[in-house]
């Protein structure tokens, strides 16, 4: 089995992106799954094309994209991506789409077909905070998640895909005392746990992971 694991370059004035630093440290093989790593620019449009090209080249069984969600306390697999770009800040090439569909012929939303609840469960077994997220935002993270799931639905129906957000690492919060963080080694452990869950679970577990509001 093969899993394409992607992570973004730094953005928004940050000098580091914990998603990228963690992915660099993830093992190259987890259980029976070979890990193919890819750095993706934090750029609308270009990010989708680079990952779509890698899918065509590598022929993975799974695609798992990782991104930074500063302000979140734990590791959060995403349930759904929506067909909208609405950028609060420009991307790394100055693009700032507002209220624009990602693909005109796409569905309003695509749901991850990875075992997201099993991923949350496996991360928690590592003693790390994790929860299922129902919003990947409207920036490049949601853009890429939607683009990957759109691409898989159109061309690679047997391939499963999804997205995980990770928190800041401590060095990013020196001037952000109100923001939570997680150590880089813990983020790596959490991602490896999530990949184990992907490898082990053909179907997701049935357990409540919803939110009240």
Image (cartoon, rainbow, N blue to C red):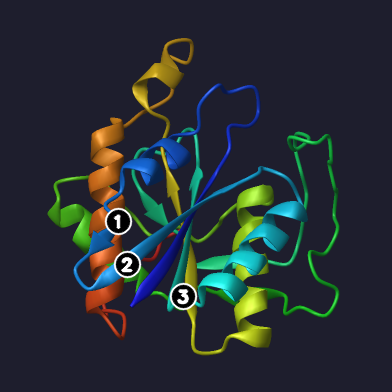
| Helix, strand or loop under label 1 | loop
Q: Residue at x 32, y 67 (%)?
A: 34
Residue 210: horizontal and vertical position, in percent? 39, 66
Rounded to the nearest angstrom, the CA distance separating label 1 from label 2 is: 6 Å
- Residue named by callout 1: 28
Circles 3 and 2, Cβ within 8 Å, touching? The answer is no
Q: Residues within 10 Å of mark 2 (few under 14, many from 20)?
A: some
> Can residue 147 be seen from the camera position used here?
yes
| Helix, strand or loop under label 3 | loop
Residue 13 position (above or below residue 103) = above
Residue 23: horizontal and vertical position, in percent? 39, 46
| Helix, strand or loop under label 2 | strand
Left or right of 100, for residue 162: left
- Residue named by callout 2: 34
Q: Residue at x 58, y 32 (%)?
A: 10
Q: Residue at x 56, y 55 (%)?
A: 136
Residue 47 position (above or below residue 14) = below
Q: Residue at x 31, y 85 (%)?
A: 203
Residue 27 position (above or below residue 210) = above
- Residue named by callout 3: 60
Residue 161 position (above or below residue 211) = below
Circles 1 and 2, Cβ within 8 Å, touching? The answer is yes
Q: Residues within 10 Å of mark 3 (few under 14, many from 20)?
A: many
Q: How many marks?
A: 3
């Amino acid at each position: 089995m093969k899993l394409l694991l992607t992570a973004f370059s730094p953005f928004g004035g940050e000098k580091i992106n914990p998603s990228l630093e963690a992915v660099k440290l993830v093992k190259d093989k987890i259980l029976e799954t070979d890990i193919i790593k890819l750095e993706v620019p934090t750029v609308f449009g270009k990010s989708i094309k680079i990952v779509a090209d890698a899918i065509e080249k590598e022929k993975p069984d799974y695609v798992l994209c990782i991104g930074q969600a500063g302000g979140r306390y734990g590791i959060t697999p995403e349930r759904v991506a929506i067909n909208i770009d609405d950028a609060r800040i420009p991307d790394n090439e100055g693009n700032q789409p507002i209220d624009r569909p990602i693909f005109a012929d796409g569905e309003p939303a695509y749901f991850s077909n990875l075992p997201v609840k099993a991923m949350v469960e496996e991360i928690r077994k590592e003693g790390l905070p994790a929860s299922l997220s129902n919003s990947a935002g409207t920036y490049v993270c949601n853009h890429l998640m939607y683009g990957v799931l759109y691409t898989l639905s159109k061309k690679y129906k047997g391939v499963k895909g999804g997205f995980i957000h990770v928190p800041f690492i401590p060095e990013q919060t020196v001037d952000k005392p109100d923001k939570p963080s997680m150590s880089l080694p813990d983020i790596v452990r959490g991602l490896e746990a999530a990949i184990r869950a992907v490898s082990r679970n053909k179907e997701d577990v049935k357990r409540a992971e919803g939110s009240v509001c």
